[in-house]
Amino acid sequence: MDAPAIRRALSRWRRELHAHAEEGWTEFWTTAHIAGILQNLGLSPRVGREVIDPGARMGLPDPQRLTAARRRARDEGADEELLRRMGDCTGVVTDMGPQAAPLVLAVRFDLDALPLTESHAPEHAPAANGYASRHAGQCHACGHDAHAALGLGLAALLQSGPPLRRRVRLLFQPAEEGVRGAAAMLDQVRDAPCFLAVHVGLGQPTGTLVTGASGLLASTKFDALFTGRAAHAAKAPQEGRDALKGAATALLGLHDLPRYGDGESRIHVGELRGGGARNVVAETALLRGETRAASGDMAGDLFARARAVLEGAAAMYGLACRISVVGEAPAADSDADLAARLAALARSLRTEQGRPLFAQVKEQAVMGASDDAAAFMRAVQAAGGRAAYAILGSDLKAGHHAPDFDLDEASLWPGLCWLAAACRELADDEGSPA
C-alpha cells in the first residue's frame, strides 16, 4: 500500500472497528480482523494465547459471555484458524524489521470498547453514516477504535518503506478499560529498551501533539459482593440481613474518605445494585468502584481504607463481604529525554505543502486519569529503558465515555506520520538504546 491508500484506509479501518465494538477480553472479532490485515501486509502476527499469559488476566467475563463473544465473532466472519490459535484469549502482537535484529521499541494500541449504549441521534456521525456499534450495550466511546486503526496504519506505512534496521514491536492490547489487560502482556515489553503509547483526545485539540504525558494515576478497580439473609420486609424484617442497606452505607462511607494533600486522589462508585422486590429484605448487593491516586503509596493506603469501609459496613448489618480486585495499574510518568526527542522530531515534520505537521507540539501535559499502559511503562523503566505516553489531540463531539463521543478523523493522519517517523528514527539510529 502506498501512503495515499493507507490514508484512505485509516478511516475505513477505524469505522470497521467502531461498528464491531467489543468489551475487554471479548475482542475476538477485533483480534481476528486486525491479525488478518497484518497478514495481508506480509507480517506474521501472534494472537491470543501466543502473546497473553492467561493466568494474569484480570476482571474476566464469565465463561458464558466469552463463549457467546467467540460465537458472535465467528458469525460475523472471523477467520476460523485465527480463532483456533487465539483460544479463549484476545490481543495481537507483530514485529516489524529483521527478526534477528535487536528489539528497540514497543508501541501499544488498545482494542476494547465500553459497556455503554451508543447514541443513535441523527447528529451523531457514526449513526448518521452507518458505522455505529452493531453490538447492543457496547460502543467505542474512548477512541480505542482509532488507536487500533493507527496501529494498522503504522504497520502498513513501515512495510511500504525501506526495511527497518532493528525491530519495532506493535502491541494490540485487550482490556484496557478497567486497567485489566496489560499485566497479561508484560512479557512482550521486557526486552524493549523504549516504550510508547498514544491516546487520542484527552482535552487536547486537533493539531496538538503531546509527546510526554505525566501524572498517570495508580488505580485499583474492585467489586464488593455483600451477602445477607432474605426476609419479609413487613412481617419479619428483624429476621433479615439487608445487603442493600450495607452496600448503600458503604457507598456513603467510601465517598466520605479523606483525600490527600500531596497529590491527586479519587474514589468513585460506578454501580450499586441488589435485591429483587420491594417487600423483600435484599439478600445480596453488588458494589463496583475504583480508587485512584498519584503515587503507589497513596493508592495502596486509599484502597486499604476503602476495604476497611466495605468490611465495616458489612459488619454493621451482619453481612458477609467478598472484595475482589478486578483491575490494577501503577502510577507512571513519561521520561523527559524521550519526550523531548519525540517532540523535536514532531516539530521537524512537514506536510506536502511545507507547513508544520502539527500546529502545536508539547513535551509535557498532565494526564490526570489512569491507563494500564503505565504497567508497560514501569516495566521498561525498571529495566533501565525509557517510556513515553503521547496524547494526539483531536476535537471531540462529546467527552470520553459519553454515548455520543466521537473524534475528528482528520487528526489521525498527522499522528500516524509522526508515529512512523518515530519508529524509523529509533530503529535506524545506531545511537538509540537497544
Image: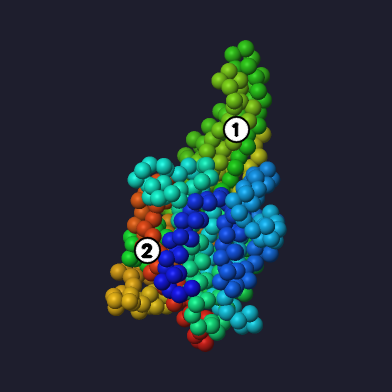
Q: Position of residue 53 (x, y in %)?
A: 68, 60
**Mark 2: secondary structure:** helix
- Ranked by sequence position, the earlier of labels 1 and 2 is 1
Q: Which mark is residue 411?
A: 2
Residue at x 64% of width, y 82% of height: 100
Residue at x 30% of width, y 69% of height: 359
Q: Nearer the viewer, residue 342 or 382?
A: 342
Q: Position of residue 128 (x, y in %)?
A: 38, 47
The amino acid marked with disc number 2 is Ser
**Disc 1/disc 2 C-alpha distance (Å):** 44 Å
- Residue annotated with mark 1: 285
Position of 341 compared to 309: left or right? left
Residue at x 58% of width, y 18% of height: 279
Report if residue 105 is visible in the image: yes
Q: Are marks 1 and 2 in contact (CB under 8 Å)?
A: no
The amino acid marked with disc number 1 is Ala
Q: Position of residue 99 (x, y in %)?
A: 63, 80
Report if residue 383 is visible in the image: no
Of circles 1 and 2, the one toward us is 2
Q: Nearer the viewer, residue 231 or 348?
A: 348
Q: Position of residue 5 (x, y in %)?
A: 44, 70
**Mark 1: secondary structure:** strand
Rendering quarter of residue 272: top right
Position of 228 compared to 330: left or right? right
Count neighbours of disc 1 (C-alpha within 10 A) and say few if under 14, some if 14 to 19, many if 20 or more. Answer: many
Q: Nearer the viewer, residue 260 or 1?
A: 1
Please, is residue 154 above or below residue 433 in the view? above
